[in-house]
Amino acid sequence: MDYKKIIASNLAVTGLSEEELYNMLALPPDTEMGDYALPCFRLAKTLRKAPALIAEELAANYPCGGGIVSAQAVNGYVNFKVDRKDLAARTLERILAERERYGSSEEGKGKTVCIDYSSVNIAKPFHIGHLSTTVLGSALYKLHKFLGYTPVGINHLGDYGTQFGKLISAYRRWGSREMLEEGGLRALNELYVRFHEEAEKDESLNDEARGYFKKIEEHDPEAVELFELFKELTLKEVSRIYDLLDVHFDSWAGESFYNDKMQPVIDELREKGLLVESEGAQVVDLSAYDMPPCIILRSDGASLYATRDIAAAVYRKNTYDFYKCLYVVAYQQNLHFRQVFKVLELMGKDWAKDLVHVAYGMVSLEDGSMSTRKGRVVYLKDVIDRCIEKALAIIAEKNPSLENKEEIAKTVGVGAVIFGALYNNKIKDITFSYDKVLNFEGETSCYVQYTCARAHSVLEKGGEERICQPDAVTPQEFEVVKKLAEFPDVLTNALEKYEPCFVARYCVDLAQLYNKFYFDCSILNAEGQTRAFRLALTESVLITLRNGLGLLGIGVPSKM
Ligand code: ARG
C-alpha cells in the first residue's frame, strides 16, 4: 500500500497537483513524530499565509482513514501517522505468503534487457579490476529477472587482437602445453610479459607476432588451434571463479564473433555518408559533438574495438530486440561508449537511446598493489581464496564446534568479496580491505549473514506458531515492519538507477533494525500473541534478507 498516495489524494492545496504533493511528502527523522510529513514552508508564498497556520488548517481538515490514523500540525509540518497494527499485519502476511518471491514483480514482463558484463580478455589475467563488472553485472541480471524482465547475460569476450599473435610467437619460442596446463593463466601471462621484454631487445619479434596474427585471421589450422588452447585455458579458469561467485551468462559471443558481421555495418556507414578518410583511416567525424573521431577502419584495413561494438549492438538488437542494452564497463571507457552510441544514433538507429553505459569506479587493494603493469597483478582468485581463508579462521575462533566450517567459510568469504565490491555507489573508486569486508560488526555481508543465523536460531527454538496481527506494536517492531515493507520499492529503485548497492545497504539497515529489536524486545520469553507475532516478524526478516542477499549472489548459512 502506498501511504503517500493516500495522503496526497486526501489533501487539497490550491495550486498543487496530487503528484506535487506526493513528491513533497517526506519521512520524518524520528518516527515518534509521525511516519510521513508535509513541510508547509514552500506553500507560504503562494498561499500568503504562515507555514504554521497552513499546517494547522491542513491537519484539521484531513479526513483520516485508509490506513492513516492521525494528522497533526507541528512547527509548520503536518505529521501523519499510519495504522501500525494494520501495516504490520499486512506486511507480514504478504511476506509469509510470497516467501522467496517477496519483492519480485512483473513490471518487466515482455521486456528483454541485454547485459554485457565481466567480458574478460582471453589469455589475460582475471584480476581484481574485473571484480566490479562481474558482480555488478550479475546482480543486475538477477534483479532484472526478479522484476519480471528477460535478461540476456553476455560475456563479450576479448578474443580478438594482435596480442594473440604475440602469444603464439612467445608460446612457440618458450612455451609448451605442459607448462600451460600446469600454470594456467599465470603461465600465459608470463609468456606475454616475456614477449614484451624480449621484443624490446629484438624488434623482429613484433613482425613475427603480426605474421601469426594474420594466420589466425586466415584460419590457419595451427594458429587457430593454439588460439583455441589459450581460450580454453582462460575459460576453464574463469569459469571456476564464476561458479564461486554464482555468475552466469547466456551468451559468450566475444569480439571475434563479429568478424563477419562488421562489413554490412561498414557498408551502411559508407552509404549514409558517415565515413570520412583521415590519415588513411576511415573514421566517423564526431567533432560536432565535442568528441574525437570514432575510428572504424585503420589505415591497414583492420577493424577496431569500436567497430566490433557497433556491429555487436546491431546484432543484439536484431537477435534479442532488446528494450535496453546495458554495458557494465569501467568509467575509463566513457568516451568509447559515447562515441559508439553516437555513431549508432547518426546511423539512424532510433534504439541507440536504449544503450546504457553502466559505468563504475576502480577497485584497488589496501596496500596499493593493483597494477596490470608487468607482473604486478592481483588475481581475483587469490583475493577470494584469502577471504575464504580468513573467514574460516574467524569462524573457527568464534564457534569452534560448528559443523561444516569449510562450506560456511566459503559462503562467508565469497559474500565478503561480492558485498565489498557492491556496497558503495558504483561510480566510486574503492579500496578493498580484507579486515573491513570481514568485520562481523561492520556494514558487511557477514554482519547480515550473522543476523540471519541469529534469526534462524530464534525460529528453531521458537516453534511453529506465527501470528501476523499484533496486539500492539513497539517502536522497535514498527521500524522493522516499515523497513520490510520498503523492500519491493528498494528493488525497483535499484534497477532503475542500476545500483545494486541500494539492495546491499538495505540489507544492512534491516539487519541493524532487527538486531535492535532483538536486544530490546524479548521474543522467546514473550507470551501468546506477542510471541507468535515476533516469530512471524523474525521469519519475515530472514526471508527478506535471504532474498536481498540472493539478488547479490550471496548465500545465507543457517548457522555461523
Ligand atoms: N574486454 C573489455 C575490457 O576488458 C571489456 C569489454 C566490454 N564490453 C564491450 N562491449 N565493449 O576492457
Image (cartoon, helix red, strand yellow):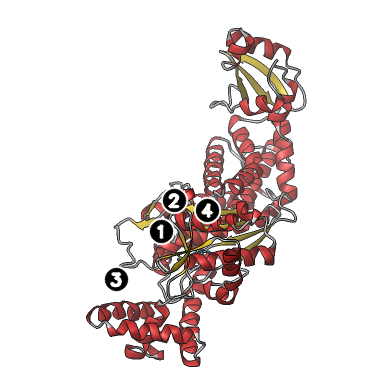
Report, in whole angstroms, how far the alpha carbon at label 4 lies from the one at label 3: 29 Å
Q: Give the crowd class for mark 3: few <14, some 14-19, many >=20 residues within 10 Å.
A: few
Q: Mark 3: is the Cβ under 8 angstroms from ligand 1? A: no
Q: Which residue sits at x=66%, y=22%?
A: 80
Does residue 28 show up? Answer: yes
Is residue 373 found left or right of 66 in the rendered image? left
**Mark 1: secondary structure:** helix
Q: Mark 2: is the Cβ under 8 angstroms from ligand 1? A: no
Residue 69 appears at what percent x and percent y? 72, 22
| Residue bearing mark 4 | 358
Which is in the foreground here, disc 4 or disc 1? 4
**Mark 4: secondary structure:** strand
Q: Give the crowd class for mark 2: few <14, some 14-19, many >=20 residues within 10 Å.
A: some
| Residue bearing mark 2 | 440
Q: Quadrant of the N terminus?
A: top right
Report, in whole angstroms, how far the alpha carbon at label 4 lies from the one at label 2: 31 Å
Residue 88 found in image quarter: top right
**Mark 3: secondary structure:** loop
| Residue bearing mark 1 | 394
Is residue 88 found left or right of 135 in the rendered image? right
Report, in whole angstroms, how far the alpha carbon at label 2 lies from the one at label 1: 9 Å
Q: Which residue sits at x=22%, y=81%?
A: 201
Residue 205 found in image quarter: bottom left
Q: Give the crowd class for mark 1: few <14, some 14-19, many >=20 residues within 10 Å.
A: some
- Seen in the picture, residue 85 relative to 171 is either above or below; the reply is above
Query: Which residue lies most toward the left here?
Result: 201
Q: Which residue sits at x=50%, y=54%?
A: 338
Residue 551 appears at what percent x and percent y? 60, 55
Q: Of callouts 4 and 2, which one flags the residue occurring earlier in the amino acid sequence?
A: 4
Amino acid found under the numbered disc labelled 4: Val
